[in-house]
């Protein structure tokens, strides 16, 4: 079993070699109906999600149907070191609740009870005997301004993780879903061996760049490998020429008008919250409706993997 992951780095040849020679076992926190799990299966078919965690009964039933795995229902904010370490995972996937950070919420950030799970994982991370080699987190726009993000970055810097952050939308990958999302990718580096190379939290916040284009600017600027750079330039040109297909291309014409009305959001609810940018939360069975899910946010993972695969 080899890891084929979506993490990127300017020194791409050495980095991809490290990635492709690593065994991959994942823990998925806040698993929901399995969006990241589904995307990981496409992007990294040889990997394995060894455990998932969520307390939503309906979402867990859908997750069970899709992946034949039953998520752990213990609250994430109550997980012990043993609860996490017993799965011997070397990668964390995290999709924490977005309500504490979303523009349509109260903006309670780390004071919101729904942020407890993420804050607990941040606190427990240094207590583990074996830290995950990779961490991937996604959330809504505004998370990049949150105290929760500040706490996460601070912990990762103290533990010598290399970090990349970005704000990207599926539109940039030719998918008809205008929903800007925050992504964080972190890789555990070797133990501290040179104080000059250590990036302190303060230094990170002063120098950090949240990328808004793909490939990342630092990747396009790297002149180390001509073949790699040629691919990056071609990819950048291709992304700029994407023709966004209509959303109707992803939906089967299987319902008559009367049946369709059962699934439409009543107009009164939309008008009541006209300033709120609605997202798509769909409880579906992947094996029957994979084509519908293509336009959802997590398709970005596939493009990360394709980049890695093209530069092996």
Image: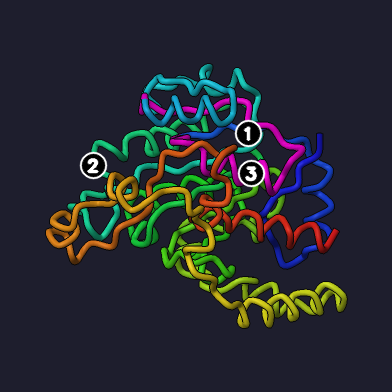
Q: Is residue 142 above or below residue 123?
A: below
* Residue at the disc numbered 2: 112
Which residue is located at x 69 percent, y 49 percent? Answer: 43
Q: Which of marks 1 and 2 is nearer the N terminus?
A: 1
Q: Which of marks 3 and 1 is nearer the N terminus?
A: 1
Q: Do the residues labelled 3 and 1 touch (CB within 8 Å)?
A: yes
Q: Are marks 2 and 3 in contact (CB under 8 Å)?
A: no
Q: How crowded is mark 1: few (under 14 residues within 10 Å), some or many (20 or more)?
A: many
Position of residue 41 in the picture relative to residue 150 (left or right): right
Residue 86 in view here = yes
Mark seen at residue 40: 3
* Residue at the disc numbered 1: 26
The residues tagged by marks 2 and 3 sit, at their Cα atoms, a distance apart of 29 Å
Q: What element carries label 2?
A: loop
The residues tagged by marks 1 and 2 sit, at their Cα atoms, a distance apart of 27 Å
Q: Is mark 3 on a helix, strand or loop?
A: helix
């Amino acid at each position: 079993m080899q890891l084929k992951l979506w993490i990127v780095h300017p020194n791409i040849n050495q980095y991809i070699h490290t990635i492709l020679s690593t065994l991959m076992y994942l823990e998925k926190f806040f698993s929901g109906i399995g969006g990241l799990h589904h995307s990981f299966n496409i992007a990294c078919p040889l990997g394995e999600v060894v455990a998932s965690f969520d307390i939503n009964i309906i979402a867990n039933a859908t997750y069970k149907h899709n992946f034949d795995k039953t998520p752990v229902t213990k609250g994430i904010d109550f997980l012990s070191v043993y609860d996490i370490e017993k799965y011997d995972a070397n990668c964390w996937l995290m999709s924490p609740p977005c309500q504490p950070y979303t523009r349509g919420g109260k903006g309670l950030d780390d004071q919101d009870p729904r942020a407890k799970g993420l804050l607990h994982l941040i606190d427990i991370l240094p207590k583990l005997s074996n830290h995950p080699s990779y961490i991937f987190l996604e959330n809504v726009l505004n998370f990049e301004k949150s105290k929760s993000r500040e706490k996460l970055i601070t912990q990762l810097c103290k533990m010598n993780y290399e970090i990349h952050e970005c704000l990207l939308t599926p539109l940039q990958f030719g998918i008809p879903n205008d929903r800007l999302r925050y992504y964080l990718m972190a890789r555990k580096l070797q133990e501290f061996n040179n104080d000059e190379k250590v990036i302190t939290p303060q230094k990170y916040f002063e120098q950090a760049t949240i990328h808004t284009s793909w490939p990342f600017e630092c990747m396009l600027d790297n002149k180390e490998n001509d073949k790699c750079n040629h691919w990056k330039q071609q990819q950048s040109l291709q992304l700029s020429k994407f023709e966004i297909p209509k959303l109707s291309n992803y939906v089967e014409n299987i319902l008559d008008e009367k049946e369709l009305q059962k699934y439409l959001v009543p107009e009164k609810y939309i008008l009541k919250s006209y300033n709120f940018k609605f997202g798509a939360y769909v409880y579906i069975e992947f094996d029957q409706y994979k084509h519908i899910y293509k336009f959802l946010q997590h398709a970005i993972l596939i493009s990360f993997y394709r980049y890695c695969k093209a530069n092996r």
